[in-house]
Image: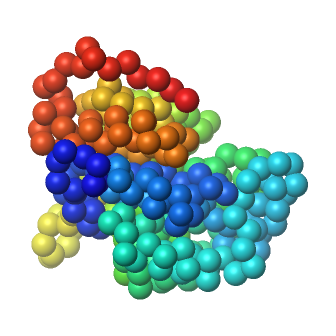
């Protein structure tokens, strides 16, 4: 986080201190986008990108109705090119992938592992075309399949994240968090929608799952999953709120191309890292959503 007054965070597989993430925006989040945010963020998640034939067909349908999507001829090669383009950047890359089948996730994760990038499994997108294809938020109601995706990615050695969404009817997000943590997810990226308190439930469930796995295995204590809170992050007040709910990091979505927003959030995360965030009042800031 070069633009911050505090030293940059060490963005390991599991974040040991608060970090700022630029969340993926379909059709926009490529290497150039990540570089543009590099003065402020610690990690930038590229994509989302459809990587199997079924999800790619759904993405074509989305383009036909005016949505921006990445549709390269070879999505795995695209991932490799984009991540390699950030090799000299201070930002750690991630790639948000959509798939209706597990093997392409494994293939994408292998590229991420080779390049030191995070492989983020998309269990988040809610467009009808993607849900009909069996990917995106549909995975939230199919925890076993989602856990299989996570396990496949983890087996490649890739740091693995799962992007999830709150307020999906019939979905117990805490149970989803337990399932993906038990499968080896190191990050859980939560779009809280209008239910910010769900971050506390996800955090507690993920930590409980990690503790249970440790108790049943004769290994060193595992790193606890990093919970990244997303939705409405615009400045100190929202960062403080998510921190109070137990988030380990925050992400900025739509305003990720606005340096004013990124700078405000980066300053708040720097204070969080320094231990000052929860103690400081903020009468000088008025958050402005875009």
- Residue drawn at (22%, 56%) of the image: 8
Residue 60 at what x, y percent from top left?
82, 62
- Residue drawn at (82%, 56%) of the image: 63
The quadrant in which the C terminus is found is top right
Residue 274 at what x, y percent from top left?
12, 42
- Against 77, residue 223 (above or below) is above
Give the color scheme: rainbow, by chain, secondary structure or one colour. Answer: rainbow
Judge by depth and name the residue closer to the eye, 35 or 57.
Answer: 35
Q: Is residue 57 visible?
A: yes
- Residue drawn at (37%, 81%) of the image: 157
User: Residue 89's image quarter?
Assistant: bottom left
In the current view of this chain or complex, which residue is farthest to the right? Answer: 64
- Against 108, residue 280 (above or below) is above
- Against 135, residue 19 (above or below) is above
Residue 143 at what x, y percent from top left?
53, 57
Q: How many marks?
A: 0
- Residue drawn at (81%, 66%) of the image: 57
Quick check: 27 left or right of 213? Answer: right
In the current view of this chain or complex, which residue is farthest to the top? Answer: 283
Quick check: 120 left or right of 266? Answer: right
Quick check: 117 left or right of 242? Answer: right
Q: Is residue 174 visible?
A: no
Quick check: 190 left or right of 186? Answer: right
Judge by depth and name the residue closer to the eye, 165 or 84.
Answer: 84
The quadrant in which the N terminus is found is bottom left
Judge by depth and name the residue closer to the eye, 217 or 90.
Answer: 90
């Amino acid at each position: 986080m070069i633009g911050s007054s505090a030293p940059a965070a060490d963005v390991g597989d599991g974040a040991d201190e608060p970090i700022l993430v630029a969340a993926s925006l379909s059709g926009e989040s490529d290497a150039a986008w990540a570089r543009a945010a590099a003065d402020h963020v610690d990690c930038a998640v590229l994509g989302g990108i459809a990587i199997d034939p079924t999800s790619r067909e759904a993405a074509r349908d989305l383009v036909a109705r005016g949505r921006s999507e990445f549709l390269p001829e070879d999505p795995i090669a695209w991932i490799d090119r984009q991540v390699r383009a950030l090799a000299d950047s201070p930002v750690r890359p991630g790639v948000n992938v959509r798939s209706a089948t597990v093997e392409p996730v494994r293939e994408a994760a292998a590229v991420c592992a080779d390049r030191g990038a995070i492989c983020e499994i998309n269990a988040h997108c809610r467009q009808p075309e993607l849900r009909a294809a069996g990917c995106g938020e549909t995975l939230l109601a199919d925890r076993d399949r989602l856990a299989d995706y996570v396990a496949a990615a983890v087996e490649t050695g890739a740091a693995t994240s799962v992007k999830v969404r709150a307020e999906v009817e019939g979905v117990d997000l805490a149970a989803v968090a337990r399932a993906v943590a038990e499968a080896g997810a190191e990050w859980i990226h939560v779009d809280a929608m209008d239910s910010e308190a769900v971050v506390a439930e996800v955090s507690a469930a993920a930590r409980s799952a990690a503790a249970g796995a440790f108790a049943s295995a004769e290994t060193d204590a595992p790193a606890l999953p990093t919970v990244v809170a997303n939705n409405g992050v615009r400045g100190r007040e929202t960062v403080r709120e998510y921190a109070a709910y137990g988030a380990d990091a925050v992400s900025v979505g739509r305003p990720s191309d606005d340096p004013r927003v990124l700078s405000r959030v980066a300053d708040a995360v720097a204070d969080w890292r320094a231990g000052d965030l929860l103690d400081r009042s903020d009468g000088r800031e008025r958050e402005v959503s875009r």
